Image (spheres, helix red, strand yellow):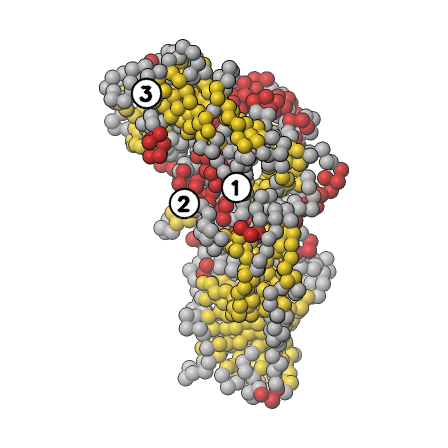
Amino acid sequence: MTFDLTTTADPLFFQENRLPAHSDHGWYASAAEIDQDGSSFRRSLNGLWKFHYSPNLVGVPKGFESDECDVSTWDDIPVPGHIQMHGYDRPQYANVQYPWDGRDQIDPGQIPTRFNPVASYVTTFNVDDWLAPGERLTITFAGAESAVVLWLNGTYVGYATDSFTPSEFDLTEHVRTGSNRLAVQVLKWSGASWLEDQDFFRFSGLFRDVTLNRKPAAHVEDVRVTTHISSDFGHATVSVALKGLVGPDGSSASVGAPGTGVTVSVSADGIGDFTRGEDGVFTAEVSDPLLWSAERPYLYEVIIEVSSNSGETVEVIPVEVGIRRFGIEDGVLKINGERVVFKGVNRHEFGLNGRVVTREETLSDILLMKSLNINAVRTSHYPNNTFLYELCSQYGLYVIDEMNLETHGIWDKVRYLGNNDDALPGDKPEWMPALRDRATNMLERDKNHASIVIWSLGNESYGGKNLLELSDFFRAFDSTRPVHYEGVHWDPRYPQTTDVTSQMYTSAADIEAYLKENRDKPFILCEYAHAMGNSFGAVHKYTQLAYREPLYQGGFIWDFADQAIEMTDRHGKTFFGYGGDNGESPHDGDFCGNGILYADHTPKPFVQEVKYLYQPFEIEVGEHLVTVHNRTNFTSTEEFRCEAELAREGEVFDIVPLELTIGPGKSGSVDMPFEIPEDGEYTVTVSFSLLEAEPWAPAGYEVAWGQGVFGSRPVAAKDPEAQPAFELVEGIHNLGVYGEHFSVLFSRLYGGMQSYRYGMDRNGGRELLKAIPMPNFWHAPNSNERGWGAPAEDGQWLLASKYAVPRRGPDQPAYALDGDTGTFSFTYDLPTNPPSLAEVTYRVHGDGTVDVTTEVTPGEGLNDMPEFGVMLITQPEFDTLTWYGSGPEESYVDKRHGAKLDVYTADIEDQLAPYLRPQESGSHTGVRWAEVTDRSGRGLRFEHEGEMEFSALPWTPFEVENATHHPELPPISKTVVRPALARRGVGGDDTWGARTHPEYLLPAGEKLTFTFSFRGIM
């Protein structure tokens, strides 16, 4: 039978002959198979399949499903996989816009015709030695994007949409002895694709597992586990309801009911045997149950055994059950009676193979989440592989499980034109059956996972009656979990659609103001802290608010990992590509790069901020007391090792244990364990680490810390009589300063210090400068700055940094000798409008130390500078940075809570973080001194009497800004040092308009002064 692909252009046609959705449990022939983690009832069809590609529906191979069609010359393609990752079509990244927008003039429900790739697959299998009489054979496509059509042995079997939940079909009536020919077609875009406009790469194909399922004649098709806990949490009732397939028509009944010829037993360690009630539901009573939470993810293993009347085992089903109570109580979200704060992250299923991810890769993600103190994940914006929920239940993460729905492209039309009638699904009745189908697919599959605490209707699909009806459908199915939908914020006509107030990217201040007037629902941010590029600034305002305002219960960072594709440029250099790099259009550029991890799932620098702001203990280290606020729900501090460390500039003097017993939600203090010496600047760092290994980290792993800084660094006053003398040479075009171990040359012609040599030799000493140090007001715009248009506003300061004009004349530079020091001042006209002025003064000491003071007078009305400091370019051999300041990762004025004061060393080449698009990065706050050296320790030392910001990179800000990908950066030929009074904070509320918070800006319109010193070191 042929299948007319054009029939897919109908919102009411979303499946045909697909089996009803059911729980995702596994079934085994024996208990031993469970331990072996492999079921003889299931057979993977993953592997190489024969493959044909057609760019549209017209070019599909006719009759390919028939045995007579020879596909031996077709290409091979791996399953699972995206066809776009294997040389067919091309990856396309689009955020809001539909991927066909502007290519085909179509309305919702219709499908593109000019370009709509169709993937045709063929494989074979044999079940002669596997399928027993009376058993049924089904096939499950765990993920097919976006619509799948199936034939077996030339006979049409069925059709299904909903890319991210399983599509299962019964093959029993079509299977034959010997070889069976399985033929599949996958459309990239069907009518259902209008419901799948998520912010991601647009792929197609069989991208999740394909599995043959052998089902005994008496098979438990569906398991539903529910738990009820008494008000005092001292008693729980666990109920297990079973549905099974009986007879050839596949009708459902209760397995083990009279006349089915089988018996069923249900038991669990720690619970005992279950009793079957008259309604067929198995129940057990549990005294003093061990409750599941993200902190203590205890799971009972319930074993369901189906046996024949003769006692022979038919199948064994394990189900992990978490006994917990989650819901809205006393107006707030609570887990087991305690107010919960979501320290969450959104997670697209995405890795180096696109959305083809393995259980092992997913486990790695979850272990990393746990190690970063993340306690919640939102499956943005579709149901994930089923193993995600299993692993979250096992390791302890709260999950918002989100239905496969987003119509953002249409929502933009509604927003801009203001017509609610255009909303999709809106109030359109023809879309409601597909919505209920998608809801059922997710609800039935995922209902038994303890980790899932909230159901979500989808994402960014505006509002309307359909979504209201859908929310009621969710509640009717499961009254134990709240329903979430953020779109009510934009379309408030039906506020009852969501049980929680959910918004995106609202500032902490605006949340607080909103909750002063609106206290009817708990409030969460389903997306916040847009982590695009060098971002994540001022996030502490949100985490602090969560413990100040009971109704604000946390949020979910956007998002977990960059969505990007590993590519190779024409020179053989690898890089991660984003929108447009595959020649696709329309596209949305690098907007796919907003994870706290890079695309290879290695951490970005600001994970140190994530981990700190999400840590379970808030620690205040004062001069006399150490105070700890326990932010957990169920865990005492005595379950961790607590130590205090006394150090000075990287040297540890003492480490002592602290005895602290502070219960969950409580605070407590202990006396400062050290007498702080008065001979310098000391740090006291209090740390909590694991007493014993956890599944996600070894014993000794640090989970929380706090630090106090005491005293001050002694400023060594220079004794003029102890300073070596130097000679001043007053030339026509240059002024030279010659000391015992150094020389300096100031150029009258070019307006600045042209040479600094330290460590004299037969060649006159090693030159440490490659260019005249210049005042600098610019950094390569980060993603947030590009988002709110900073380059256009800041352009005056780019001109000032690149094209400052030194004043020339007999009075330039102004210079004078003062004892054993010499002062040389240069004035620069800055080409801003109106003009600005800068002055750089060098004070040279006899030991080779040079104090540099930069003063800038901005033109009236100019905006704040991206940064204010000096750019000094030195030799590329100086490739090692050592600094005493905040670290170990980069930090900025609004992103430094997770950085400790200490001494650190790093390779300068690694200081430019490999964000998806090159941008400002690698700066360090709180720097007292820094050294830029070669491998032998020779180089330059920079100091500041207080705290400065410091950056050392192999490229100038202009070179970084000019590169759209890292391989475009020029070969390393220098080291660019940028000591600064301050740099603008990175921002991070969002990346399309939110600016850096005012307190993290340099003051605008004020005269600013910055002083630091440098000296050569050997």
The 10 Å Cα crowd at callout 1, few under 14, some 14 to 19, many 20 or more, is: some
Is 551 left or right of 696, judged from the image as shown?
right
Mark number displayed over residue 566:
2
Q: In 3D space, how far apart are the residues under numbered discs 1 and 3 (Cα atoms)?
A: 38 Å
Q: Secondary structure at mark 1?
A: loop
Tag 1 residue: 296
- Whether residue 657 is visible to the viewer of this picture, yes or no, is yes
Mark number displayed over residue 904:
none
The residue lying at 48 percent from left, 31 percent from top is 271
Earlier sequence position, callout 1 versus callout 3: 1
The 10 Å Cα crowd at callout 2, few under 14, some 14 to 19, many 20 or more, is: some
Q: Secondary structure at mark 3?
A: loop
364 vs 444: above or below: below
Horizontal and vertical percent position of residue 432? 57, 19
Tag 3 residue: 312
Horizontal and vertical percent position of residue 688? 54, 55
Earlier sequence position, callout 1 versus callout 2: 1
For the N terminus, the quadrant is top left
Q: In 3D space, how far apart are the residues under numbered discs 1 and 2 (Cα atoms)?
A: 38 Å
Question: Viewer-proximal residue, 438 or 913?
Answer: 438
